[in-house]
Every structure is written in structure tokens, then in C-alpha cells.
Image: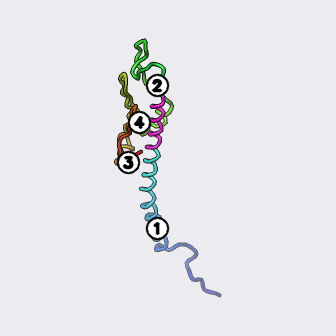
Amino acid sequence: MPHDIHPRGRGFTLIEMVVVVAIIAILAAIAWPNYTRHVAKTNRVAAQACLSQYANYMERYYTTNLRYDQTAGGTANADPQLGCQGEVSRSYTITQATDRATFTITATPTTVQLGRDSLCGTLTLNQTGARTPTANGCW
């Protein structure tokens, strides 16, 4: 009768299981920070696109009314509630500040994005196309 290498049956030893768990833990420790950075960057890019869409709206509004803050009849320029605002609402709050000749659109990070994107933080875009922050990688 031949002798098996594992006389108690076929299975994994405790050492083999510990090695597998250790490998999974190491891979997770590397992958999780990369994943969260990627999610933060993706949310930031979506907010940037929304700011650009908002700026396009403001320029069309100015073309029609020759001012950013109200119509020729005196009606205030209300927040247009663009579709992109809903798309980024889990990560950013979009607001506008206008007067006759200028506007500034602001994307303020909220909830988890606030902690994940400490490099860039609040994004702004104005009527001249100036963007803040100017840190490398934020725009």
C-alpha cells in the first residue's frame, strides 16, 4: 500500500493559509490607496467638466442679456440646475457668484472627497478662464 505525503487527507495546512492571507493583505495595502486616489481624481475631473459646462451657460446668458447677473428686465440670473450638478453632488457643491461683468463658479468638495483630495480642494473658474487652485495636477 503506497503512503500519501499528507496522511491525514488532502487539505491546506495552517502555514499555507497564513501565507495566502498575508499575500492578500499586502496586495490590498497597495491597491486600496491607489483606488482611492483614482476615485478622487475622477470626481475632480467630473467637477471640472461641470464648471466648464456652467461657464458655457454663463457666456450664453451674457450673450443674450449683456450681463451675467440679471436679464435686461431686471430678473436675477437663477442657478440653472445643470445636469452635471446632480452628477457631482455626492462629491462637490457647485455655486455661482455673479455681478454685471463677472462671474465665479465654485466647486467645493464635500463628504469623503474633502478628505481624499487634500491637494486641490475647492476648484474655481471665472469669466476670464482663470482657474484655481494652480497646483500641478489640479486642472
Picture layout, residue 33 above or below residue 90: below
The magenta stretch is: 43-56
Mark 1 or 2, closer to the camera:
2
**Which residue in the structure is indicated by mark 3?**
116
Judged by depth in the image, the label closer to the viewer, 3 or 1, is: 3
Between the C-alphas of marks 3 and 2, the distance is 28 Å
Residue count near mark 2 (Cα–Cα under 10 Å), binned few <14, some 14–19, many ≥20: few
Query: Quick check: is 124 in the magenta stretch?
Result: no
Q: Residue furthest top?
A: 73
Secondary structure found at label 2? loop
Amino acid at pointer 2:
Pro
In whole angstroms, how far apart are the C-alphas of marks 1 and 2? 51 Å
- Numbered mark located on residue 23 in the image: 1
Q: Residues within 10 Å of mark 3 (few under 14, many from 20)?
A: some
Along the polypeptide, which appears first: circle 3 or circle 1? 1
Q: How is the rendered protein coloured?
A: rainbow
Q: Which mark is residue 129?
A: 4
Q: Which mark is residue 80?
A: 2
Please report whichever mark, 3 or 2, sits nearer to the chain's N-terminal start: 2
Judging from the image, what secondary structure is the residue with disc 4 in?
loop
Sequence-wise, the earlier of marks 4 and 3 is 3
Check residue 52 for magenta coloring.
yes
Q: Amino acid at mark 3?
A: Arg
Q: Are marks 1 and 4 in contact (CB under 8 Å)?
A: no
The main secondary structure of the magenta stretch is helix
Position in image of residue 130 (x %, y %): 38, 37
